[in-house]
Each structure stands twice: as structure tokens, then as C-alpha cells.
Image (spheres, rainbow, N blue to C red):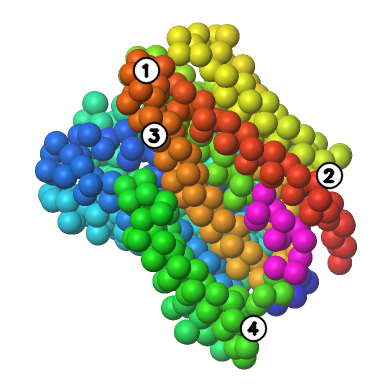
Amino acid sequence: MSHTEISSRRPRAASRWTALGVLSTASLMTILDGSIVTVALPAMQRDLGFSPAGLSWTVNAYLIAFGGLLLLAGRLGDLLGRKIMFLAGNAVFTAASLLAGLSTGPGLLIAARFAQGVGSAMAAAVVLGILVTLFAEPGERAKAIGVFSFTGAAGASIGQVLGGVLTDAFSWHWIFFVNLPIGLATIALAIRVLPDERGAGLAAGADVVGAVLVTSGLMLGIYTVVKIEEYGWLAAHTLGLGAVSLALLAGFVARQMTARTPLMPLRILRSRNVSGANLVQMLMVSAMFAFQIIVAIFMQKVLGYGALGAGLALLPAAVAIGGVSLFVSARLNTRFGERAVLVAGLLLLLGAMSWLSRVPVNADYVTDLLPVMVLIAGGGLVLPALAALGMSGARADDAGLASGLFNTTQQIGMAVGVAVLSTLAASRTSDLLSAGTAEAAALTSGYRLAFGCATALLATAFVVALVVLRQPRPERQD
């Protein structure tokens, strides 16, 4: 499909911005669902009789399905049509949300969470692909990506607050029921405003063997990573399943080099910006787990905040990231270029993590934590710039694949961040407790280690951005 063909069917300006609202709402719903559940876990455990190990599967089932299917869903969007994939994904997610809210036992809830992950993957994988075809003019595209990134930045913090409110005021069931009206409205509007573009057809890339290899490899890999905290890095469970996952993914790459109709044409990785932006994102997302989750745990376990109080304490960060991505990032990207803005944003995030790595046991919110909430605004520069760079090297008929790849590296980065940083923090804390250190001091030392590792990850992302990424050339307007 040529750029001219897509442009000729592009909706009017008003419809395009309405379409952006639909895409952003769907993305917000997906991100909210990832964070809103964490607050309600104790209530679910009491009500449904979850074991401690079983309770983690309400999160893991979603992550495995979501992260494992993104790449496949993105390519299927290119082949079958991105609008069809988006609508189907939202329908599956909405139906699964109803099933989750009606769950009366652990097995049904875990199955519903897996189905939610499937629907989220189908919809999220093609969102950026639709966005870049809707907004071809660089200035408009920068604004659109800024708005889209704002919803992502706000989603995690809003989810923690909303989850606490709904669970306390009603019950945990309502954290899933709230998706129903949003999902139905999104589907109804998407039918009207999203462009009707035909896919290339399954014959252009119906590689069944490749699909099985990449999906099973990614799912098994994410499962292995999220279970590291339980089994340990050098356990037979981790090493054995990790080796199988790597073998499956290696087989997928080999298959793509020889298949007549590859599921993922490897040409997409030859673009420095596509491969570089995905690597930077994986490193950055891994590091930012330290802020999104560990800071909230630190405030509750060490400083004595409640769940709702911790969520409210994180709101300045969400406002800072959202404000920068919504009102500032597009102008800076247009004037200085995405690469320069990305580098500046990474420097701000480095400052935030460095500040956290020295946080004291008796931290004061205003002097020790609020500066971090301000510096974390760098995320509002990083996210839109990364999205633009990650999609800049994709051809029109690969936009869904590039979008799915971008979301896949995000999920892998999140899973790796959870496994690595939480395991390191827990290990340091355990060692200090065994040595007789007070609990608050031991916990704080563990968290500081995690923040220090996050700083190192961000420093690596900064170097990769400088060495690998290049400022995209302006697109020709036909």
C-alpha cells in the first residue's frame, strides 16, 4: 500500500482528531487495566480465596498474553487491516472485562485476565500504525504523538488512585466493570472515524510456523522472567525455560530469513531508528519500573503512606509528564528534532533516578521526593520522541508490525524491570535483615540499590540514543 493511497483515504481534520481521541482512550484503558488491578489484589484474595502464589497470576496471565501476542497482532493488522484488528481487540477486551467482573473463583478470573491480555494486544499493537497513517504532516504528527503519550503517562498513576477509590467505595468487581461503557463507546466511535484501509492479505505474510515460534517464544520468555523472583536467577526452572525461549526466538529469526512470506520481514530491523528506538525504550521502561512501582512501595512500607495516599503523592509526576507531553513535546520535536529532545529527556530522568538513589529512611516528601516528581517530567519528552523515532523507519505496509514491535519491547522492558530490580532490592533487604539491620533501613537500602541500577540502565539508554539514533529526514508531501 503506497503512501499516496493511504493519504487519499485519510479522514477530514476534525475526524482525524476524533480518531486520535478514540485511539488514546483505548490505550488509556489498556494501561489503566495494568495498574488498577494491583491496588485491588488484597480484596480479590480475601473474596475469592486465592493462595499467595495464585494471586500473582491475576497480573502474570495478563502480561504473558499481552506481551506474547503483540508482535503477531501487529503483523496481522498489516495483513487483515488495522481497523479490523483494533475493533476486534477492543471487543475481546470488553467482553473479557465483563467476565472478570463476574468471576466467582480464581480460575475464572485468571482466564478472564488472559483474555483481557489477548484483546489488549490486538488493539494496542496497531494503534501507532493507525496514528502515523492518519497524521502524515510532521507538525501534526508530533502533536498527535504528544497527545497519545499523555494518555500513557497519566494512565498508570490514575489507575492506582482509581483502583483504590473503586475498591473502597464499591468492590473489586468494579475495576473491571468500569471498562464496559468505555469499551463500547470506543468501538462505536472507531467504526465511524477510523480509516477503512485494506490489509495486504494473509498471502503476503501468512507464516504459520513463524507465528507459532515467536508467540510461544515470547510467552515463555515473559513467563520465565516474571517467575525469577520466585525461583531465582540460577535455578533450573529459570535457566531451562530461558534456554527454550531463546531457542524458539532464534528459530523464528532463522525462519524469517528463509520464509517466502515472512511474518516479520527482517528489513524493518535494518533501520537504525527502529532498532535503536526499541532498544532505548526497553532500557528506559526497565529503569522506570523503579519509579512507577518501587517508589509507591517505599512510601507505603517505609514512610507509612496508605495505598490511596501513595497514589496521590505520585500525581505530581503524572501531571508533569502529561503536561510536558501534551503541551511542550510537539513544539520541541518540531523545532529541535526528536533525537535531541529524547536525549534531553533522558538526562532529566537520569537526574530523577540519581536523586532517588540517595533517598533517606526518614525521607521528607517536599525535599526528598517532590524534586523527583518534577524531574520525572523528562518522561514527557522521551515517550513522544521515542514513538516518532520508532515508527520513522517503517514502510506504510509495515506500520502495524513496527507498532507491534514497539509495544512488545515496552512489555519486555517492563517484565525485565520487575524481575531484575525487585529481585535485587529483595536480596539486599534480606541480607541486611539477617545481619540485624532495622527493617526500615534494610528496605530503604534495597530500594536504593534498585534506584542505582535504574540509573545505570538510563545511562546506557542515553549512550545508545547518542550513538545509534539519527534525526529522521522530513517526509515529502505528495
Q: Answer above or below: position of 187 versus 335.
A: below
Which secondary structure, mark 3?
Answer: helix
Write down the residue under mark 2.
337
Judged by depth in the image, the label closer to the viewer, 2 or 1, is 1
Question: Which badge, 1 or 4, comes first in the chain's sequence?
Answer: 4
Across and down, in percent, residue 359 comes to 53, 17
Judge whether 470 appears above or below 322 on screen.
below
Disc ID at residue 257: 4
Please tell me which of labels 3 and 1 falls first in the chain: 3
Q: Secondary structure at mark 2?
A: loop
Residue contact between numbered discs 2 and 1, judged by CB atoms under 8 Å: no
Marks 3/2: CA–CA distance: 41 Å
In the picture of the structure, the residue carrying the numbered disc 1 is: 437
Say which label, 2 or 1, has the lower sequence index: 2
- Image quadrant where one finds the C terminus: bottom right
Give, as a single range, the part of the protein colored magenta. Answer: 269-280
Q: Which mark is in front, 4 or 3?
A: 3
Mark 4 or 3, nearer chain start? 4
Q: Which element is circle 4 on?
A: helix
